[in-house]
Image (cartoon, rainbow, N blue to C red):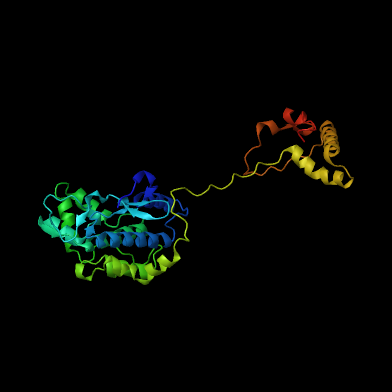
């Protein structure tokens, strides 16, 4: 199986970074509801079930290795697939990303020993990326950063030791942002479980009610997007003096039966007459509105409010 990356749109990592920025600015985004979390989990678990049916394990499942291809999320970076049950010497292994690694991988890395590849590794990593969508940040990044900044030489080893020994390293929230209580329980009780014997398989996960319902609902939710929301329309410009004059006088002229060019000519005649008399009706002046364009700027004089040169030269066509 393979994917042509040029046909992909963006990775889940790209989406999470975008949505975190939208969340901070108070704008809606693709992770504003639980729907996308369930779709990602469903598509990921389906892909893992397929791989593991071929006796493969991804080994480095993370948001950067999940890509949107127009109608579904697909696993990428498949050139380093592991074989189920093979033994890997962790003294020089580099197939994993520490903050998404399962505790058994962390334990083997910290003790510099062998680890037996298991499908449970990918299930833990899948839970970590779903939790990242809920938190809009990598769940274990604060701990990883703290260990590495306090000891640049041995920080990674200390982090892996902590991940291996902590019975509940993942910060699953008590009060979620968008995830349902059912989804949080799936993460806590079936995926992000330190004991590999208690961790669910991909096929187990596909039979869980939340994923069964998500599969039935496909594909009604809109695709994820990195586009920002549409900006609000600009405020309307304040009316010019002539526009106010026309609004005041046009209904009366229309009631006299004037229409089309005849109406425009009469409006122009009355407008010029008002200019000569210094009695043009001033437009409203809302304090919060932007100034009118220079061509329609109003010039005050001792005779009253007068239009600029641009308005003085109005002809029938401009009306």
Of residues 119 and 243, the one nearer the viewer is 119
Q: Residue at x 43, y 53 (%)?
A: 224
Of residues 259 and 85, the one nearer the viewer is 85
Residue extending farthest to the right is 256
Left or right: where 12 falls relative to 191: right
Q: Residue at x 17, y 58 (%)?
A: 106
Of residues 106 and 83, the one nearer the viewer is 83
Instruction: Please say whether residue 259 is visible from this viewpoint.
Output: yes
Instruction: Please say whether residue 143 is visible from this viewpoint.
Output: no
Figure disc tally: 0
* Quadrant containing the C terminus in the rendered view: top right
- The quarter of the displayed image where residue 216 is located: bottom left
- The quarter of the displayed image where residue 268 is located: top right
Of residues 177 and 51, the one nearer the viewer is 51
Where is residue 264 shown, x and y percent of the image? 82, 37
Left or right: where 283 falls relative to 263: left
Q: Residue at x 56, y 48 (%)?
A: 232
Where is residue 238 shown, x and y percent of the image? 68, 42
Q: Is residue 167 above or below residue 65?
A: below
Left or right: where 192 falls relative to 261: left
Q: Residue at x 35, y 61 (%)?
A: 41
Q: Is residue 17 above or below residue 295?
A: below
- The quarter of the displayed image where residue 259 is located: top right
Q: Is residue 148 above or below residue 269?
A: below
Where is residue 108 shown, x and y percent of the image? 13, 58
């Amino acid at each position: 199986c393979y994917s042509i990356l040029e046909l992909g749109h963006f990775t889940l990592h790209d989406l999470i970074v975008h949505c975190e920025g939208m969340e901070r600015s108070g704008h809606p985004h693709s992770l504003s509801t639980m729907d996308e979390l369930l779709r990602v989990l469903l598509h990921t678990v389906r892909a893992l079930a397929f791989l593991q049916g071929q006796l493969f394990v991804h080994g480095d499942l993370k948001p950067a290795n999940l890509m949107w291809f127009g109608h579904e999320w697909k696993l990428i970076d498949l050139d380093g697939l592991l074989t189920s049950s093979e033994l890997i010497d962790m003294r020089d292994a580099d197939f994993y990303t520490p903050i998404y690694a399962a505790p058994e991988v962390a334990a083997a890395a910290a003790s510099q020993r062998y680890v037996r590849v298991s499908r449970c590794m990918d299930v833990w990593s899948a839970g970590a990326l779903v939790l990242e969508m809920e938190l809009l940040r990598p769940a274990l990044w604060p701990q990883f950063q703290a260990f590495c900044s306090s000891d640049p030489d041995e920080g990674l080893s200390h982090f892996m030791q902590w991940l291996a020994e902590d019975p509940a390293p993942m910060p699953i929230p008590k009060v979620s942002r968008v995830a349902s209580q059912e989804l949080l329980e799936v993460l806590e009780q079936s995926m992000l479980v330190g004991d590999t014997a208690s961790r669910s398989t991909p096929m187990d996960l596909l039979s869980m009610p939340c994923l069964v319902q998500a599969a039935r609902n496909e594909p009604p939710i809109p695709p994820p997007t990195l586009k920002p929301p549409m900006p609000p329309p600009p405020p309307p410009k304040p009316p010019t003096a002539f526009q106010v004059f026309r609004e005041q006088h046009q209904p009366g002229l229309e009631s006299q039966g004037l229409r089309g060019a005849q109406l425009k000519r009469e409006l122009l005649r009355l407008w010029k007459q008002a200019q000569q008399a210094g009695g043009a009706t001033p437009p409203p002046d809302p304090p919060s509105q932007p100034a009118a364009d220079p061509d329609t700027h109003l010039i005050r004089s001792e005779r009253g409010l007068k239009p600029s040169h641009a308005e003085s030269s109005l002809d029938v066509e401009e009306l």
